[in-house]
Image (tube, rainbow, N blue to C red):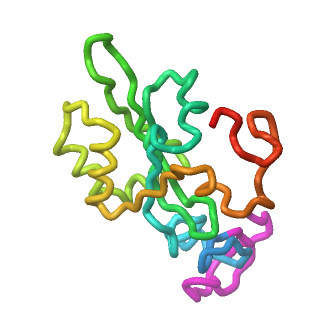
Amino acid sequence: MESTIRRRAYCYLCDKDTQVARRQIRFNGKLEYHMVCRECKEIKLMGKDHEGDIKQYVLLSEAWYAKSRLGNADYTDDVNFGFYSPDGGTSGEMSVKWYRLQDNKPPSPKLECFSDAWHTLAQFKDVIDAMAEVDGQDITPKEFCQLLGRCGFVDATPRKYEDSYPSRRFIPIAWGFDEDGAPEDE
């Protein structure tokens, strides 16, 4: 969120005497409000520095919740990857999904990225270069995860229910879960 009140003052980040506004920025892994100039906001901030975040991926077909997520999906598998905070949340993520385009051919991978993660996509030049090396090949989800591993990503797939909810007090009790918080289909 940005304040409409602008004034001449020193920027919190670059220390230039310039036009500043009160802006919400990510600083040392936390969202804070500071008087920041337009250049610093556009270049460095708004959660785009990925400071302290970890490059991770999740392979949907191996997650404990795969059956419910893939059941009615129009794709056969999904690998989400991006920068993830150790405290939870992400500063940018995208996915590669596999779609069956022809009955007698293997599913084809498709990169999907929302506009708020384009900056993150630009940080993954090594991933794009590695993908270019297998251009036109319908690599499998596991092969794509190996590619991510070679680019420094960590496998964060929650293969067991407990991997997603290590503390029972945070388990959502809702449709699809029994009274102990475990999924009903397992």
Residue 32, percent across and down?
A: 71, 75
Q: Main secondary structure of the magenta part?
A: strand
Residue 4, percent across and down?
A: 78, 63
Q: How many marks?
A: 0
Give 127 or 45, whichever is nearer the viewer.
127
> At x 56% / y 24%, what residue is drawn?
71
Q: Is residue 31 above or below residue 139?
A: below
Residue 7, percent across and down?
A: 74, 77
Relative side of 8 to 131, left or right: right
Magenta stretch containing residue 141, yes or no? no
Q: Is residue 96 above or below residue 37?
A: above
Magenta stretch containing residue 15, yes or no? yes
Relative side of 9 to 49, left or right: right
> Which quadrant is home to the N terminus?
bottom right
Relative side of 34 to 136, left or right: right
Residue 181, percent across and down?
A: 76, 47
Residue extending farthest to the top is: 103
Give 73 or 111, whichever is nearer the viewer.
73
- Picture quarter containing residue 174? top right
> At x 62% / y 81%, what residue is drawn?
18
> Which quadrant is home to the C terminus?
top right
> At x 79% / y 34%, what residue is drawn?
175
Q: Is residue 127 above or below residue 27?
A: above
Q: Magenta segment range? A: 2-24
> At x 75% / y 71%, what residue is drawn?
6
